[in-house]
């Protein structure tokens, strides 16, 4: 029995292709207009490529392709075929842009170079990641190393980047390395905002003696769904035997709503305990509903 193939979403493909091209172009502008003319660096495979370009005058676009090639092979077996295809397309277009866009120095101010060079690069990489591609295979390398060590992916990436910036400090001076670290920080923050959105989610746990009133305000006032756990309050130092049954309220909000939620809780119960944690990804429920501010 043959299963029907889902029809391709033409406009979805056009939208993804547009985002990919715009992202690659912005990343190329970040390198060609800011970092390369001023001998600044970034982290990851791009940072290694920039180092090799400065030290040995290797072609930057070709170096990025060659260094990412083994990581592309690893991604095919560890992440999946679709990601590997998107990664290869992204890097090839990126290499072509770097090949044909000449160096043009937008500014010589080192702070502006770090901030805006990192911003252009980060926004570009983030847009490519949103459509399932990648311009830098360092996370694939970290994922492969993770299986053989006890370090986390973040720790592995940090270690690799420390090595890159240490070499930059030894060869080009500590000032260049420090500005390059600022570039990397700016780029990573921009990637986070583009990939996760400005309305990144936070999970909030609230423990209060006035949970019934809080539940009403959270659902009907803030417009958020809630989950209620049955628990006990009390167990205080010096008064361990005192305890009370309570409802533990959990909800997911956007970071833009955090201040509003805290004010709401404080108005109902100034003694309420609030605990918030970042959530990398959330979907379903009423999360997609437009929140009223």
Image: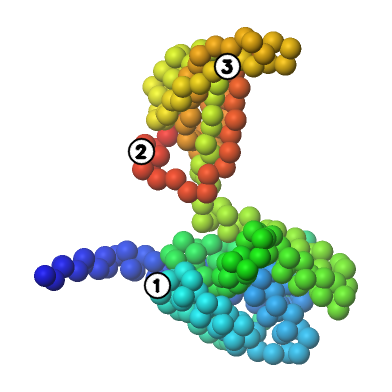
Q: Which residue is mark 1?
A: 82
Element under label 1? helix
Determine if residue 115 is in view: no
- Relative vertical location of residue 102 with respect to residue 112 in this rendering, above or below: below
Q: Which residue is mark 3?
A: 233
User: What residue is drawn where x is 79% and y is 64%?
Assistant: 179
Q: Nearer the viewer, residue 33 or 279?
A: 279
Determine if residue 191 is in view: yes
Tag shown at residue 285? 2
User: What residue is drawn where x is 73% and y is 84%?
Assistant: 52
Report the Cα–Cα distance between label 2 and label 3.
29 Å
User: What residue is drawn where x is 82% and y is 70%?
Assistant: 166
User: Does label 1 or label 3 sit earlier along the sequence?
Assistant: 1
In this image, 175 relative to 50: left or right? right
Residue 99 in the image: state x and y as whole percent.
Answer: 58, 86
User: Does label 2 or label 3 sit earlier along the sequence?
Assistant: 3
Element under label 3? strand
- Relative vertical location of residue 291 with respect to residue 235 in this rendering, above or below: below
Q: Nearer the viewer, mark 1 or mark 3?
A: 3
């Amino acid at each position: 029995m043959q299963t029907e193939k889902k029809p391709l979403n033409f406009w979805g493909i056009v939208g993804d292709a547009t985002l990919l091209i715009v992202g690659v172009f912005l990343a190329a502008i970040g390198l060609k207009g800011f970092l390369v003319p001023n001998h600044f660096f970034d982290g990851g495979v791009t940072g290694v490529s920039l180092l090799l370009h400065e030290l040995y005058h290797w072609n930057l676009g070709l170096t990025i392709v060659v260094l990412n090639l083994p990581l592309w092979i690893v991604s095919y077996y560890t992440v999946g075929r679709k990601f590997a295809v998107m990664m290869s397309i992204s890097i090839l277009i990126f290499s072509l842009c770097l090949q044909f866009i000449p160096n043009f120095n937008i500014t010589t101010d080192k702070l502006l170079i770090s901030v805006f060079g990192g911003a252009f690069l980060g926004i570009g990489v983030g847009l490519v990641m949103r459509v399932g591609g990648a311009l830098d295979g360092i996370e694939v390398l970290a994922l492969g190393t993770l299986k053989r060590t006890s370090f986390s992916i973040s720790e592995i990436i940090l270690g690799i980047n420390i090595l890159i910036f240490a070499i930059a400090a030894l060869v080009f001076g500590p000032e260049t390395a420090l500005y390059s670290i600022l570039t990397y920080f700016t780029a990573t923050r921009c990637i986070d905002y583009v990939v996760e959105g400005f309305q990144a989610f936070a999970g909030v746990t609230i423990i209060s003696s006035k949970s019934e009133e809080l539940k009403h305000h959270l659902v009907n006032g803030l417009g958020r769904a809630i989950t209620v756990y049955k628990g006990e309050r009390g167990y205080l130092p010096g008064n361990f035997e005192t305890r009370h049954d309570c409802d533990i309220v959990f909800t997911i909000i956007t970071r833009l709503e955090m201040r509003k939620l805290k004010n709401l809780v404080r108005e109902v119960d100034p003694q309420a305990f609030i605990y918030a944690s970042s959530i990398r990804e959330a979907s379903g429920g009423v999360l997609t509903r437009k929140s009223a501010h």
